[in-house]
Amino acid sequence: MSSGLQVSDRNGVSRMYDKILGCLLGAATGDAMGAATEAKSTGQIKEIFGGRVESFQKPPRDVQARGRKPGQVTDAFSIPYMLTNAIMQADGKITRSQWNPCWSGEIPSILNHLRA
């Protein structure tokens, strides 16, 4: 990899890897946390969950993520995940032509896996 996405520094610690992983973990956690409350008002969330949602909850039947387990990511997470992979494969310099094959080829299979 080029210097833009170094796997390790002179101490053997991967600062960029940690940053990328942190971003992905944040996106996945936020997606999974919000799956149960998507499109709900604050009042609806209080009514359904008894207050603030501070842990993973099973999405109710009237949300798009219905049928998912608590803590399971939705198809929305596939976009930052696949984009991150494409950026890393392109050494940090991605173009539309590099992103389009990734989007059209791998995203549908990931979406099917996430829906299972």
Image (cartoon, rainbow, N blue to C red):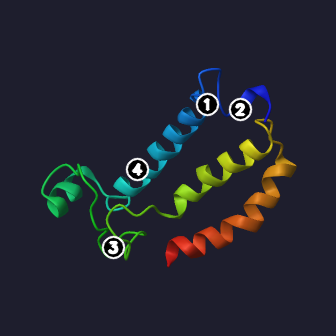
* Displayed quadrant of residue 65: bottom left
Q: Which residue is mark 3?
A: 62
- Horizontal and vertical percent position of residue 113: 56, 74
CA–CA distance between discs 4 and 1?
20 Å
From what the image shows, is residue 52 above or below residue 103?
above
From what the image shows, is residue 73 above or below residue 67?
above
Q: Earlier in the sequence, mark 2 or mark 1?
A: 2
Dot 1: element? helix
Q: Earlier in the sequence, mark 3 or mark 4?
A: 4
CA–CA distance between discs 2 and 1?
6 Å
**What is the crowding at mark 1: few (fewer than 14 residues within 10 Å), some, or many (at least 20)?**
some
Q: Earlier in the sequence, mark 3 or mark 2?
A: 2
Q: In this orientation, which residue lies closer to the viewer: 1 or 11?
A: 11
- Horizontal and vertical percent position of residue 53: 23, 52
**What is the crowding at mark 2: few (fewer than 14 residues within 10 Å), some, or many (at least 20)?**
some
The amino acid marked with disc number 3 is Asp
Q: In the rendered structure, find residue 16 and report the number of the disc placed on it.
A: 1
Q: Is residue 36 left or right of residue 47?
A: right
CA–CA distance between discs 4 and 2?
24 Å
The amino acid marked with disc number 4 is Thr
At horizontal 55% and vertical 33% (from top left) the residue drawn is 19
Q: In the rendered structure, find residue 5 and report the number of the disc placed on it.
A: 2
Q: Which residue is mark 4?
A: 29
- Horizontal and vertical percent position of residue 55: 24, 53
The amino acid marked with disc number 1 is Met
- Are the residues flagged by discs 3 and 2 in contact, CB closer than 8 Å? no
Q: Is residue 8 left or right of residue 43?
A: right
- Are the residues flagged by discs 2 and 1 in contact, CB closer than 8 Å? yes
The amino acid marked with disc number 2 is Leu
